[in-house]
Structure formats: C-alpha cells, structure tokens
Image (cartoon, rainbow, N blue to C red):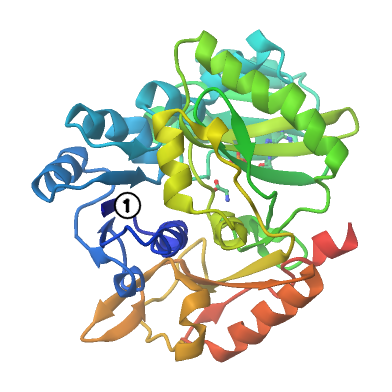
Amino acid sequence: MKILVVGGGGREHAIIKKIRENKTVTDIFALPGNGGIAADAVCIPIAATDIDGIVNFAVENKIDYAVVAPDDPLVLGCVDALEARGIPCFGPRANAAIIEGSKVFSKNLMKKYGIPTAAYEVFDDMDKALRYLESAPLPTVIKADGLALGKGVIIANTREEARDAVLTIMQDKKFGSSGDEIVIEEFLEGPEVSVLSFTDGSVVVPMVSSMDHKRAGDGDTGLNTGGMGTVAPNPYYTEDVAKRCMDEIFLPTIKAMNAEGRQFRGCLYFGLMITRDGPKVIEYNCRFGDPETQVVLPLMESDLLETMQAVTEGRLSELDVKFSKGSACCVIMASKGYPLSYEKGFEISIPEQLRDRVYVAGAKLDGGKLLSSGGRVLGVTELAATLPEAIEKAYADVEKISFANAYYRRDIGKRALEA
Ligand code: AMP
Ligand code: GLY
C-alpha cells in the first residue's frame, strides 16, 4: 500500500514510524515531512495547507490511503477534497473538524448537549466584552474563536490583563479573523489529562491517557509552548474518572456531533480537567496531540494502519484495540529561546542506537547533515514497566543527543510522580 501523511512535525514522525510496522505498506510519503522524517518516509515539499497540491500529488501517485494529521488542513477540508477524488482518509471532514476550528461552536455544542465544561459567554463586540470584564470573576480565561497555533488562550489574573487580552485579540487582531469572536470563560482548577480517542462516529475507543507539559520552564513556569514533554499513562485518569468521562463526555460528544449532522471520524482529542465537581472539557482537538502522540503510539500494541482503516470504514467496533500496560516518557529538546526567538541551523548528533526512539519535529537535511530548523527540534521517547524507569531512560538518551543551543525541561513526569 502507498500511504500519504500530511504534516511535518514530531507527531507525524511518530505516526509514520507506527504505520511502517504494517507489512502491507510499501511506500510512505510525508507532505512536507522534515529532515528527520526523511529517514522513514519520502518527503515532498508540499505545504500541509496546500490542499490542491496535496490532492494532485495523491492522485498522480495513486495513493491508497491518506492520514491528515494537523489541524489546519483538516479545518480547511483536506479530507473532503481527497475523498472527492476517491482517496480514503483518516481524519474528520471539515464539518466535523469545526469542533476544534471554532471554540464558539464547541462551547455551544457542549451547552446544548449538557457536556460538562467551564461556564462561558461569547462576544463578537469588543465593547460588550470589555464591559462584561468589569465585573467578571477573576482569574478569567479569554479564548480566540479560531485556530491560533495554540496561542489563542489567555488566562488573566487581573482586570487589566483581561482588558489587554481582549484588545490584543479583537482590536490588534493578533490572530487575524480567528479573533472576530471570543469566548470568555470560567477559570477551572484541577489536574489536566489528555485523552486521544479513535472514533468512527458510532463507538469511541480511548487510547492510553497522557499528560502534557505546556510551559517552557521547570516547575511549570514561563511561557506556554506547543508542549515540552509528555508522559503516559496519566495517574489522574483513574478507572473511576475514565468511566465518568466515557458516560458524561466521550459518548455524549459523539452523539451530539451525529445529531448535528457532523459525524466525526478520526482521532478526537479530549483536553480534560479533573475538577472537584468531576471531569470537564477544556478543549477538543480534531486530531492527534503533539507531543502526546509521541508517548501514546509507542504504547499501542495493535496495528495503527488497520485501526485507522476501520475508523474510515465505520467498523471500529469489530476491533480490539490494545495498549501496553507499561509507561512512556517523551522529553522535547528545543532551541533555547523557544517559544520566542531562537537561533537555528546547528548540526544535530543522534547516536545510531537511539534513532528508533527519536521523533524529529524541527530539522532539515543539508548536504547529509541534520540541522536544527525549528523551536521544538526533536523528542525522545522511552518505554518501561514503570514511569520512574521510563523517565530515567528518556533523560539518559537526552544526554547522548547534542546540538548547539539545545534546551529541555528537566522535570518531565515529576508532576505525575507526585500524583
Ligand atoms: P488550550 O489552547 O485550549 O489547550 O488551552 C491552553 C491551556 O490553558 C490549557 O491546557 C489549560 O492549562 C489552560 N486553560 C484553558 N481553559 C482553561 C480554563 N477554563 N480554566 C483554567 N485553565 C484553562
Ligand atoms: N499538546 C496539545 C496539542 O496538541 O494541542
């Protein structure tokens, strides 16, 4: 089979390595991929948002199955466009990807169907939003409606910060039209859990739970990033919590999307907060998380491609999708300065015996050398019977990988161990 994977980060590298385990796979193309992914797939310089380019490539190269991994092509209708040319895909159509593409949509969906989430108000008028904030309880959370590279959420502790957030989003248009509408919501407290799930619109199969580390600095300090490391499973996701999530959140969400005529097929990511009143939805993503995927897929014992095809064909209930009982830890090595400005272009040295465990996010090939080219450069994942062992092994690997200007958090998994 000829497989196409849209995207070019650490998540896509993890998906590609897992898909390669399927013996029927003959070729994998990554659009655009990256210098590290090039070791496992043929990288084609077509941007993940170039829908026409992706479709033309897929048709010309007789692709048998496509996986659309990032949020923007999903929201732009990449799956719809590929399907229209007869290419089966993993990923939701645009009318279902809106669950991530519009926070106003997802909040209204949750309210309409009684799915637990933070209380909220929606504003399309800046003056009304500012007036509301004069008496809103603090801290408060301000979210741009649309996609904003994971930066459209601002937690304001003071009225001034809240005001600035609204001005940045609605007046300065920092996130463009993504900020035409905003959600202002209640600040929730409790541990966060990420649950990625496979769903074909009739059943939901949660994958092993995970925990992200979003802040740049140790002890969860500093700026928000795309994610500096992950562990799985997440100790806060107990059997009791898992059951409540299935009954109160996962199944109701699938049913709600069906009722709206927006059946979701693909990976639905539940960003949850385990509050004193029970689990609540912080956000939905219409795709695999990054870097959650880099700990979740290595723990998957079932065949990924077969599972994806069952999702596409609506026969997920026939499968018994299995995950290992072990633990995983992924430490992200970034360029110092990320998520602000950073220097790049430094040669990366990865010992041969670690290649299987490294997922490359931001690197390019230049005359046979692998050079850093992004904020998040790579992730190293280790598996072990217990979480402390997985953490220790991952950090031992990090010590053996080097590039100038490298930065990583030293406390990935610490919060989970303290749970
Ligand atoms: P998001 O971009 O939606 O993943 O939000 C980024 C982060 O902001 C989340 O991972 C949470 O840590 C935090 N966050 C979002 N919404 C809330 C909320 N209502 N209460 C507290 N923290 C929140
Ligand atoms: N790690 C969170 C995300 O992928 O959005």
Residue 385 vs residue 153, the one in the foreground: 385
When asked about the image quadrant of residue 204, the answer is top right
User: Mark 1 packing: few (<14 Cα in 10 Å), some, or many (20+)?
Assistant: many
Q: Nearer the viewer, residue 50 or 258?
A: 258
Q: Is residue 417 above or below residue 157?
A: below
Residue carrying label 1:
5
Looking at this view, name the residue that lies furthest to the front. Answer: 318
Q: Is residue 173 visible?
A: no
Q: Residue furthest left?
A: 60
The relative height of residue 244 versus residue 295 in the rendered view (above or below) is: above
Q: Is mark 1 within 8 Å of ligand 2?
A: no
Q: Position of residue 399 (x, y in %)?
A: 61, 88
What residue lies at 60% left-to-right and 83% top-to-bottom? 398
Is disc 1 placed on a helix, strand or loop?
strand
Number of marks? 1
Q: Residue at x 37, y 39 (%)?
A: 72
Question: In the picture, which quadrant includes the C terminus?
Answer: bottom right
Counting from the top left corner in percent of width and height, residue 41 is at: 29, 66
Q: Amino acid at mark 1?
A: Val
Q: Is residue 139 left or right of residue 172?
A: right
Residue 305 location in percent, x, y? Answer: 42, 50
Is 23 displayed left or right of 292 in the figure? left
Residue 81 visible in the picture: yes
**Residue drawn at the location 52% of the way across and 80% of the way down:** 406
Depicted 349 relative to depicted 105: above or below: below
- Report which quarter residue 187 is drawn in: top right
Residue 178 drawn at (x, y percent): 43, 30
Q: Is residue 318 above or below residue 358?
A: above
Front residue of 104/412: it is 412
